[in-house]
Amino acid sequence: MVSCPRPRISDVPPRTRAAAVAALLLLSGCGGGGDGHAGAAGVGDPYFPKAGNGGYDVTHYDLTLGYTPATRHLTGTAVITARATRHLTSYHLDLTGLDVEEVTVDGEPARTSRAGQELTVRPGTGLREGEVFRTTVRYSGTPRTITDPDGSEEGWLPTADGAVALGEPVGSMAWYPGNHHPSDKAAYDLKVTVPPGLTAVSNGELRSERTLPDGRRTFVWHTGEPMASYLATLAIGKFEVRRTTGKVPGYVAVDPTQVAASRAVLGRLDEVLDWAADNFGPYPFRSTGAVVERPDDAGYALETQNRPFFPGPPELGTFVHELAHQWFGDSVTPRTWRDMWLNEGFATYAEWLWSEDHDGDTAQEIFDSVYAGDYYDSAEAGKAVWAFPPGDPPSADTISDPPVYVRGAMVVHKIRQLLGDDAFYDFLQGWTRTHRHLVADTDDLEAYAEGFAPEADWSAVWDDWLYGEGRPARP
């Protein structure tokens, strides 16, 4: 059995590291070729090397779950449809905690072993390159809350009356097995049964809900567009549900204690989506909405696909930010976690554009305030923007730091300055159209921008603002 070494990319220049990862995986036989027979444990992400798995591509997750908040007990059956990208005698799934009771491959029993977050599956017969196969995993237990490198919590978070599952960057492996890396997107069907009086909210469209003879309730959700696992969510609890019937059907679920304080901002859902579509191109999904829980249920909002999550009543700027992520992050998804600025820089810039279009500060005024150090309340916070270049965060615990968000937005503004307003909006809409429902990295953005305006000198944008150390000099 051939082992798959993780690529060593420390000496590769930041601007070409994403391409180097893919090339090294391919050469090592852990990507889409090679003569080895073991799928890789991890795809070589520069910050989360164990995330994801090599040797196959997931196309669909079919999850059947039951959860009892009083005992915090989860039961699950996951049917994972995938295509082998090489000949396989074994492969890995990401799953942390939870007890695995049975695994079959195409209906036949498979041998398994576990080490950390890796569930190794050995089917009775090998899988041919290009073969579509189904892995069924039956599991149960108490899902874990995962502490990220930056100290935030994700995974399965118990709430006052249920739970919420949040997955950025690797928390989804706490509640279902899979290929948990943003580079492998898939469609989802989720069927979840909860105690009487509770509601289960997930991504996509609600296909059905029914009450069982014992009073329990079953909800069936379908997500047809490709979705990265970190964007999958499940919120269980008591909710006041409002369905909207605008251009994009909406499903908004709010904890009853948060309804009054959330009403004003949530009532602008259609307005924000119309504005965003004018700027970024057609909305990329079939449904929209939001989930609002109590403020102490999580410490952050998250752009969960179709249905962003908010811990308490959202502020308007945060609401705009998370909805902009439906284009930048959810539809156009980062190839690796090094490309996080493609999510956060563009979503932060969306806040600046909203301000500009709604009688607030212009994007240029906000840019100037950040550059001068006046944007934040403290000098220390102002300096933090320049701690590292947004295109090359130094470690896993910094991928959500201010340079990725705010200096990332400054990179977007420098692109706007270089192109001019008319061309800039064509650029935004062309980028989201060209990479709709795909994954992309920073090299892809650079190539697209340079191809969009080949006569322009892009060196200062990339070398000084995206990858330069410290605060760039103003031209």
Image: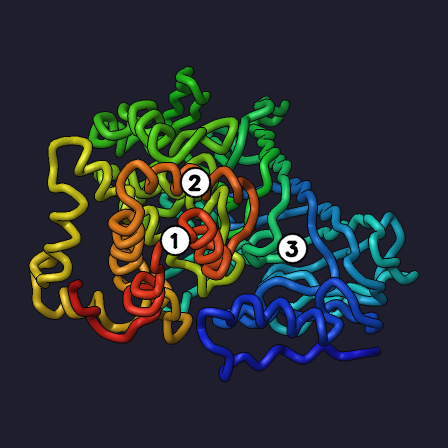
Query: On screen, 3 above or below 344?
Result: below
Q: Position of residue 168 (x, y in %)?
A: 45, 55
Q: Secondary structure at mark 2?
A: loop
Q: CA distance from mark 3 to mark 1?
A: 44 Å
- Which callout, 3 or 2, points at the residue further toward the start of the chain? 3
Q: Kindly tell me whether residue 142 is visible in this rendering.
A: no
Q: Which residue is mark 3?
A: 178
Q: Mark 3 belongs to which amino acid?
A: Gly
Q: Position of residue 278 (x, y in %)?
A: 35, 28
Q: Secondary structure at mark 1?
A: loop
Query: On screen, 334 above or below 318?
Result: below
Q: Which of the two residues, 378 or 206, is positioned nearer the viewer here?
A: 378
Residue plotted at (51% across, 36% down): 203
Q: Which of the two residues, 134 or 76, is positioned nearer the viewer here?
A: 134
Q: Mark 2 belongs to which amino acid?
A: Trp
Q: Which of the two residues, 330 or 263, is positioned nearer the viewer here?
A: 330
Q: CA distance from mark 2 to mark 1?
A: 27 Å
Front: mark 3 or 2: 2
> Which label sits on residue 455?
1
**Label 3 crowd bin: few (<14), some (14–19), many (20+), radius 10 Å:** many
Q: Which residue is mark 2?
A: 327
Tell me, yes or no, whether the two marked residues, 3 and 1, touch with CB atoms within 8 Å. Answer: no
